[in-house]
Image (cartoon, helix red, strand yellow):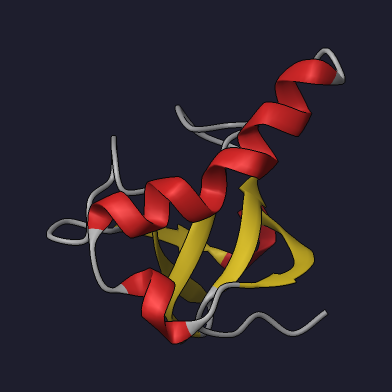
Amino acid sequence: MEVKRGQVVRSLAGHDKGGFLTVLEVSPPCAMVCDGKRRPLERPKRKKLFHLAPTASVLPEEALRTNRQIRTALRPFQDSARQSGE
């Protein structure tokens, strides 16, 4: 699956393993990702694409404006991961 701006991805490696992030920019072989909390918009994380598992969800451009909007948009993904026991 091709990764694009606004797409929700799950981290497969690193300190944020298992966490959900959103893609801000893609420049193969890496993507700049943030979650609005540990990784705010002001200092996004650069991750290699093979360390990311893309989901089918893409956040609208309006949801990528502030850290609070990003956290709010990612909350359902994190809640569902907690409920499934991961």
Q: Residue at x 54, y 49 (%)?
A: 74
Please name whichever residue, 57 or 62, is drawn nearer the observer in this view of the structure. 62
Q: Residue at x 25, y 54 (%)?
A: 67
- Residue 84 in which image quadrant: top right
* Quarter the N terminus occupies: bottom right
Residue 2: give x, y in percent of width and height.
Answer: 74, 85
Q: Is residue 83 left or right of residue 60?
A: right
Q: Is residue 30 left or right of residue 10?
A: left
Question: In the rendered image of this protein, does residue 55 appear above or below residue 65?
Answer: above
Residue 79: give x, y in percent of width and height.
Answer: 67, 28
Q: Is residue 23 visible?
A: yes
Question: In the rendered image of this protein, does residue 76 appear above or below residue 40?
Answer: above
Residue 38: give x, y in percent of width and height.
Answer: 29, 35
Please name whichever residue, 33 or 14, is drawn nearer the observer in this view of the structure. 33
Q: Is residue 12 visible?
A: no
- Residue 61 in which image quadrant: bottom left
